[in-house]
Image: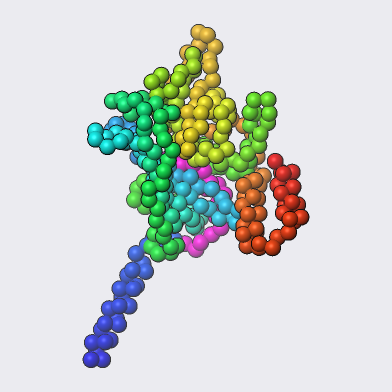
Amino acid sequence: MFRNRFKINVFLLTMFAIIGNCGDSLRGKPTQAMPELAGFYVNEKSKEWFKNGKIKIQTLWIRRTAKGEMEFSNEILTRLQFSISENREELKVKSGKVQTSDRELLFFETIGREFHRKYHGKNSDDPKSWEVRSFGPFVKVREFAKLLGEGTGRSAELSQDKNAIVFSNGDVYRRIGNPLLGRVSINLGKFKKTIDNEVAGVILFPLDAEAFPQTEGRQNFFALFSTTDPLSVGTPIKIAEFPGQVQEVFEHVAVVELNKTKPGIAPPEIQNFSSLILDGVVDSKTISQKESTDELIRRLKQDPNVSKEELIRELEKLKTKE
């Protein structure tokens, strides 16, 4: 009996050891997060999906938190056409923390969400011609959470030039533009605006007159951004290094356009998956305004006894940084 119990205990310990080693782990000692890792990346498989007729793109947005840690948001946007059910766009989002050891990376997924937005406009054989303004809002249809350290880590490595992330399964994500650090100053009409430098995007496809009203001499494009929160109509951007602006903002996506060219000059040719960055002056050494705001919110949550006077002082400090 004792021998059988011993065998069972050995078996259980072995199984626990195997389960504990199922998840990816860092080969080296964990190091402080690299600020240069912050950015907006696009999976190279997205181009193949478009070549095969799928309107599908997978992106990775990494940003630095107020604590100096790195967090990520991995998104897959797909436009689907059905013969029986309603046409729609699906957005799958996985988010979590990033642990680093030099150029070695480990992504821990903590929350997964899935959103749908239905298309209510005129149907077309080509989903790229669907009316952009005829989509409903994104509605969450599913959500799940995972605990850190339960074997959900995905290992990857930052390339030598720090412009690409290569996962252990072979997926390659290339960054759009430079690292998203500090704050950026842009000219919005007659005013100058300074915002957190966290916005980058990519062109998905050009829009025809059926999908979006055309302005003479300009070309519109459907684009996906890391975040659309700071964007507004008229925000200056560079589309593959050519000047342009945001035409209309939706959730996660936007319509952008090239600036009107002079008569007799042909507009530049823009390819699918061309880069989108804000057209402004970046100060990478400044502290993110959102980080300061997050710190204040965190303090208020942790200490409900913060006085009104102290709160006003903290808000005034944030105001002076704008």
Q: Is residue 103 left or right of residue 5?
A: right
- In the image, residue 33 lies in the stretch drawn in magenta: yes
Q: Is residue 137 left or right of residue 185?
A: left
* Towards the viewer: 146 or 11: 146
- At a point 34% along the width and 73% down the height, the residue shown is 16
- At a point 38% along the width and 62% down the height, the residue shown is 151
In the rendering, at what x and y percent does residue 129 appear?
36, 25
In the rendering, at what x and y percent does residue 250 appear?
48, 34
Location of the N terminus (image quadrant): bottom left
For residue 178, say whether it is visible: no
Q: What stretch is highlighted in magenta?
A: 27-43
In the rendering, at what x and y percent does residue 34 appear?
55, 52
Location of the C terminus (image quadrant): top right
Residue with the most extreme bottom position:
2
For residue 184, say whether it is visible: yes
- At a point 74% along the width and 47% down the height, the residue shown is 316
Chosen colour scheme: rainbow
* In the depicted structure, whether residue 270 falls above or below residue 227: above
The picture quadrant where one finds residue 53 is top left
- At a point 29% along the width and 33% down the height, the residue shown is 81
In the rendering, at what x and y percent does residue 290 appear?
62, 47
- In the image, residue 210 lies in the stretch drawn in magenta: no
* In the depicted structure, whether residue 30 falls above or below residue 275: below
Total number of numbered discs in the rendering: 0
